[in-house]
């Protein structure tokens, strides 16, 4: 979390979480469309099936390290961007999972008594 003396940390844009988590596939899809590329053609050039690429672009499959590197090769955008976006998305989704959040609370309570 970024802190600046005299400023509420929740008033700093980098500390805020988006209201709707953004899957990196959405960003990659926008990039592909803005370049006028076709998904089928890109999938073929990347050596992956169209259905796999489409699932990533529609947020139904995560961007793995290997796919991030393939997107870097195809689009010239650093793989770390895709991996960080995927990690952020995963974290936000976990924090929205009520059952998982309850489990975290139980763990915190159990550890607090030690």
Image: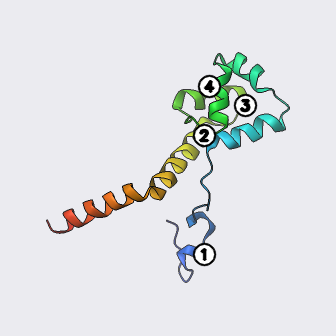
Q: Earlier in the sequence, mark 2 or mark 4?
A: 4
Give the image location of residue 108, x and y in percent: 27, 64
Out of 81 and 50, give the one closest to the viewer.
Answer: 50
Q: Residue furthest bottom?
A: 6
Q: Position of residue 32 (x, y in %)?
A: 77, 34
- Which residue was labeled with disc 1? 11
Q: Which mark is residue 52?
A: 4
Q: Residues within 10 Å of mark 1 (few under 14, many from 20)?
A: few
Label 3–label 4 contact, CB within 8 A: no
Q: Is residue 60 visible?
A: yes
Numbered circle sitting on residue 82 = 2
Element at label 2:
helix
- Single out the residue that lies furthest toward the left: 114
Where residue 67 appears, as percent x and y from the top left, is 58, 28
Give residue 58's quadrant in the image: top right
Between disc 3 and disc 4, whose residue precedes?
Answer: 4
Query: Mark 2 or mark 1, which is nearer the start of the sequence?
Result: 1
Q: Is residue 45 above or below residue 26?
A: above
Q: Crowdedness of circle 4 by 10 Å Cα count: few (<14), some, many (20+)? A: few
Give the residue at x 65% y 16%: 47
| Callout 3 crowding tier (Cα within 10 Å): few <14, some 14–19, many ≥20 | some
Residue 79, by quadrant, is top right
- Viewer-side residue, 4 vs 29: 29
- Is 69 situated above or below 89? above
The residues tagged by marks 3 and 1 sit, at their Cα atoms, a distance apart of: 34 Å
- Mark 3 or 4, which is nearer the eye? 4
| Residue in view at x 56 percent, y 34 percent | 61
Write down the residue under mark 3: 75
Q: Secondary structure at mark 4?
A: helix
**Total labels drawn:** 4
Label 3 SS: helix
């Amino acid at each position: 979390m970024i802190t600046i003396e005299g400023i509420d940390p929740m008033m700093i844009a980098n500390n805020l979480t988006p209201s709707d988590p953004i899957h990196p596939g959405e960003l990659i899809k926008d990039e592909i469309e803005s370049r006028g590329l076709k998904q089928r053609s890109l999938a073929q050039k990347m050596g992956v099936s169209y259905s796999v690429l489409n699932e990533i672009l529609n947020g139904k499959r995560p961007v793995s390290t290997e796919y991030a590197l393939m997107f870097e090769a195809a689009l010239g955008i650093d793989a770390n961007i895709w991996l960080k976006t995927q990690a952020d998305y995963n974290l936000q989704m976990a924090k929205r999972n009520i059952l998982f959040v309850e489990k975290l609370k139980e763990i915190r309570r159990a550890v607090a008594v030690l």
